Image (cartoon, rainbow, N blue to C red):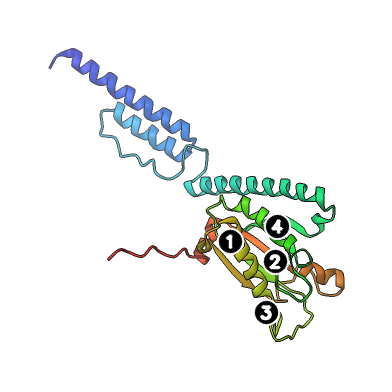
Amino acid sequence: MERWLITYADLITLLLAFFVVMYSISTVNAQKLQAVASSLSQVLAGKAPEILDFSGPTIIEGQSGAEHGEMMEGTELETVRLQLAEYLEFLETMDPNIKENIVIMQQERGLVISLKDTLLFPKGSAVLTPRARQVISGVGKSLAQLPNYIRVEGHTDNLPIHTAQFPSNWELSVIRATNVAKQLINESSISPEKISATGYGEYRPLVPNTSEVNRAINRRVDIVILKHKYEYFEPFPEEESSP
């Protein structure tokens, strides 16, 4: 063998080891760096190096693929929150009291838009007012761009209701949530497969039902944009396989 080939082979080996070390440093992972150093020592000693596993954390320091996805999702939800805040400011120019009826908040499960019943329905009714339809349609424009599941939740206070249409608060809360969901589907072109409607009646109060002020807080419809990690509880229907 020509002597220059031996020198060339050594140079290629050292370059390979150098780039492996540089890659390891870019990941800022102590375990990987130690593994690369051990492998490099074996190469320089003329031994066969051990196979390195670079699966797992991404190049972003200490961040797995799932964590990176959650960060990106958080950014998307924050963008929507800011859009809704701007929309709320626009509504306030026409109705200075609108902020008393709409609350936007981040929760562990996702982004929540809470709408008081006085904004949405006449007393004891589940029929959306024209004003409510306008507000919900405006909210839906910001939600339509998201792939997330949306859960619409109806809530009432603890005052009993017993009519031909609503035998209890359960029926009232469910139908109110359903009508809001239908508005999002029909006016904002949100896929019905992404939306669910549920009614909690009087059993998920925000505050104790000890005064009319508190009961007014508890009468609400919440539009919840769920984080992806909760999709297990809102399973997307599988596509039917072709025959």
The crowd level at tag 4 (other Cα within 10 Å; few <14, some 14-19, many 20+) is some
Q: Nearer the viewer, residue 2 or 85?
A: 85
- What residue appears at the point 57 percent right and 67 percent down from the top-left corner? 196
Q: Amino acid at mark 1?
A: Asn
Q: From the image, state whether disc 2 or disc 1 is nearer to you.
A: 1
Q: Is residue 124 left or right of residue 237?
A: right
- What residue appears at the point 77 percent right and 75 percent down from the top-left corner? 157
Q: Quadrant of the N terminus?
A: top left
Q: Nearer the viewer, residue 37 or 134?
A: 134
Determine which residue is flagged by label 3.
170
Q: Quadrant of residue 240?
A: bottom left
Q: Which mark is residue 186?
A: 1
User: Does residue 121 lie above or below 106 as drawn?
Assistant: below
Q: Is residue 135 left or right of residue 25?
A: right
Q: Find the distance from the CA under tag 4 to the CA under tag 3.
A: 26 Å
**Dot 4 or dot 2, earlier in sequence:** 4
Instruction: Tell whether label 2 touches label 4 (CB within 8 Å).
Output: no
Q: Nearer the viewer, residue 53 or 123?
A: 123
The crowd level at tag 2 (other Cα within 10 Å; few <14, some 14-19, many 20+) is many
Q: From the image, state whether disc 4 or disc 2 is nearer to you.
A: 4
**Dot 1 or dot 4, earlier in sequence:** 4
Determine which residue is flagged by label 2.
221
Q: Which mark is residue 155?
A: none
**Dot 3 or dot 1, earlier in sequence:** 3
Determine which residue is flagged by label 4.
134
